[in-house]
Amino acid sequence: MKMQELQKIGIRTRKAQDEAVALLKLNSAHAGSFAAVAENAEAFLEDETFQKLAQAILDQGEDSFVPREEPAPWGQWGEDLEEGAVNQMRNACDLPVACAGALMPDAHLGYGLPIGGVLATEGAVIPYAVGVDIACRMKMTVLDLPVNWLEDEQDRLKSQLSRDTQFGIGASFRKPHRHEVMDADWDVSPITRQNKDKAWSQLGSSGSGNHFVEFGILTLTESQPEFSIEPGKYLTLLSHSGSRGTGAAVASHYSKLAMEQHSDLPRELSHLAWLDLDSEEGQEYWAAMSLMGEYAAANHACIHRSLAKNLGAEVLVDIENHHNFAWKETHFGKDVIVHRKGATPAGDGVLGIIPGSMASPAFVVRGKGNPESLHSASHGAGRVMSRTKAKQAFHWPDEKKKLKEAGITLLSAGLDEVPGVYKDIHSVMAAQDDLVESIAQFDPKIVKMANGGKAED
């Protein structure tokens, strides 16, 4: 019996649903009595079989979760999306605070809201719909160095990349970077206050998983008003990372608060518990999230500043955007909170960066401001398998050969980040041609990620 069916007959809270599931495990025929128990729970309080379920139903109270009469409208881009991700998007649109949604073509399963999910709410912010890595972002810097450095000066680029970057859990610098973000008000939340020293030590570092820093070639085929450079090929630096351990601490703390406030949510919606924006907790989370946005941007700024300085390069163009964030926007004539969990802002004329994999292109895009997608696009290619399955399916000797054939120099990465774990970026881009237009292409050449098992093994 599905959770949606239990909700419809009045078994709405996680506790009540757990009791129902326990009964089904004992005897599936018990399902035939659930509606009667839900309708008149008091009559079953002395029933040896159903008394625990009856009590749990009575404990729900009149203020327990009730889904919308009609789900909030939402659209989907791309076909053959992971069923779990589609179901998560559908469930999110049952929330009473939801007013619209969109699912991007790179979508895959996440916590609560799927990766690639966009959700607009009224008067509420959902910490898990923002994500654990708050304000994870992309940054691209076009340098004035010759493109032939990628071959002629490869050792120098590799060496500098290794010296100026740190990856993974606990990554930090003996001599902390300096950036004005550390002069901001870190007392906006007890979590940011407690983690300020940690954040400072990690400033300029990158996370694990799919985070990277890489050198490559940007190809600009036509003049673009947003670029101060002529069409051609340019040596370019691209990075992907977020707000590190402090962002994760903020997400964890306020997600737990939200879940405690909405303990009546059914299991499939428990990670979509929200905080009212006019509450103290909601205001605290919003301020902390905003600070993590500034901090994530500072991480990238430190990386790009250090590499450009130590290579003696001038910056020709800077482009950046972040995802895993919530924005106050106006859509359909309403002031709403738009959560983009693994989705790129794509308002009319807004620039963004959508990467593929370590061996496939990234694209600089210009948003088309499609209202149906809530002005959003995908944030990448999207995974096609879990990290566990990837480690079972791939082997470094085979992957090294493929990367060499593709002209990629890999300094470090986990086996769960090889190209085969991602969708074809060209198909993903084709599925959202009504959301963004591509104006430039970046091809990675020297790639560094967190060492989840050495590529040379």
Image (cartoon, rainbow, N blue to C red):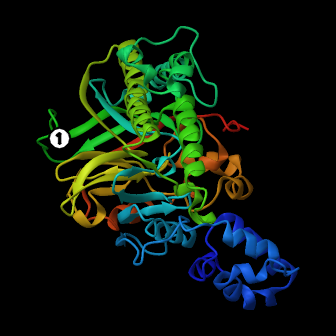
Which residue sits at x=56%, y=36%?
A: 248
From the viewer's side, name the closer residue of 159 and 86: 86
Q: In this view, does 297 lie above or below 83?
A: above
From the viewer's side, name the closer residue of 313 and 27: 27
- Which quadrant of the figure has residue 288? top left
- How far across and how far down the image is residue 384, in percent? 56, 62
- How far across and how far down the image is residue 239, in percent? 43, 34
- Neighbour class for label 1 at 10 Å: few (<14), some, many (≥20)? some
Q: Where's the N terminus, which quadrant? A: bottom right
Which residue sits at x=44%, y=34%?
A: 284
In the image, is 155 to the left or to the right of 51?
left
* Amino acid at pointer 1: Pro
Which residue sits at x=79%, y=87%?
A: 30
- How far across and how far down the image is residue 290, in percent? 38, 34
- Which quadrant of the figure has residue 308? top left
* Residue that badge 1 annotates: 231
- Which quadrant of the figure has residue 173? top right
